[in-house]
Image (cartoon, helix red, strand yellow):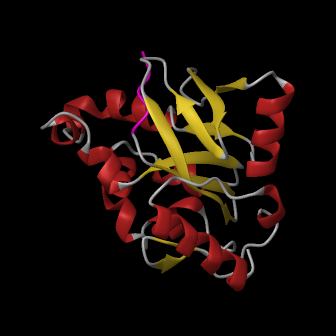
């Protein structure tokens, strides 16, 4: 995104406190994108950028605990629906601590890879697919599950297999090996 458009989009998002999915017109510009106060550089991998985001420390800790750092540093490309720290905090008390235990590594990996789709799915492509499919589209995750994407106004909503909903609050954070779309909830597989 150009800096002017990005700043305008972020100010609008902060001012309304409503999730906004970046318009396709803005999706082709990526300089100066910040997530969690850190600039996300399109020359870095998903992990190299995520470790700098103050809003994604829980996600990064989980990726490390699940042994997924090498995978998300690989060529990909991947589309990651990245829950914020606040999203993880919405889970029942003790859930994150339990998932981070070594004996729960497989479960944690399943939850995290449920947020990843193979390939690079940009905002404009996802919105077009939702519209072309009559209002909802199914995304097959790396975990083998399904996320259902739909629109609520201009906001992309993800419905997980348990019926939980996440809003995309920041879209098209381009990475060297894919794209991140920031979400406000943790999506859970069956």
Q: Nearer the viewer, residue 47 or 156?
A: 156
x, y percent for residue 114: 50, 31
State whether residue 23 is above or below residue 8.
above
State whether residue 76 is above or below residue 186.
below
x, y percent for residue 87: 34, 47
Describe residue 179's horizontal placement relative to residue 66 as left or right.
right
| Magenta extent | 186-190
Give me the residue at 21% from left, 30% from top. Answer: 103
Q: Report the quarter where the N terminus lies.
A: bottom right
x, y percent for residue 92: 18, 33
Give me the residue at 16% from left, 42% from top. Answer: 97
Give me the residue at 38% from left, 57% from top. Answer: 60
State whether residue 102 is above or below residue 38.
above
x, y percent for residue 150: 65, 31
In the image, is residue 187 part of the stretch drawn in magenta? yes
SS majority, magenta: loop
Quarter residue 88 falls in: top left
Give me the residue at 69% from left, 72% from top. Answer: 42
Q: Report the quarter where the C terminus lies.
A: top left
Q: Nearer the viewer, residue 131 or 120?
A: 131
Describe residue 156's horizontal placement relative to residue 189 as left or right.
right
Task: Give the residue furthest to the front.
Answer: 16
Describe residue 145's horizontal placement relative to residue 109 as left or right.
right
In the image, is residue 61 part of the stretch drawn in magenta? no
Number of disc labels:
0
Quarter residue 155 falls in: top right
């Amino acid at each position: 995104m150009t800096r002017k458009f990005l700043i305008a989009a972020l100010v609008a998002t902060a001012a309304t406190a409503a999730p906004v999915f970046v318009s396709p017109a803005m999706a082709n510009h990526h300089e100066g994108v910040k997530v969690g106060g850190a600039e996300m550089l399109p020359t870095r991998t998903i992990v190299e950028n995520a470790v700098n985001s103050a809003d994604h420390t829980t996600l990064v800790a989980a990726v490390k605990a699940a042994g997924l750092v090498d995978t998300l540093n690989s060529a990909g490309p991947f589309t990651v629906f990245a829950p914020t720290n606040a999203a993880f905090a919405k889970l029942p008390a003790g859930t994150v601590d339990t998932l981070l235990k070594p004996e729960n590594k497989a479960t944690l990996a399943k939850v995290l890879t449920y947020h990843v789709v193979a390939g690079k799915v940009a905002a404009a492509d996802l919105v077009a697919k939702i519209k072309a499919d009559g209002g909802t589209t199914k995304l097959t995750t790396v975990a083998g599950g399904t996320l259902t994407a739909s629109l609520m106004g201009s906001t992309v909503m993800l419905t997980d297999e348990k019926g939980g909903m996440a809003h995309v609050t920041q879209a098209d954070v381009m990475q060297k090996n894919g794209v991140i779309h920031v979400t406000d909830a943790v999506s859970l597989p069956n």
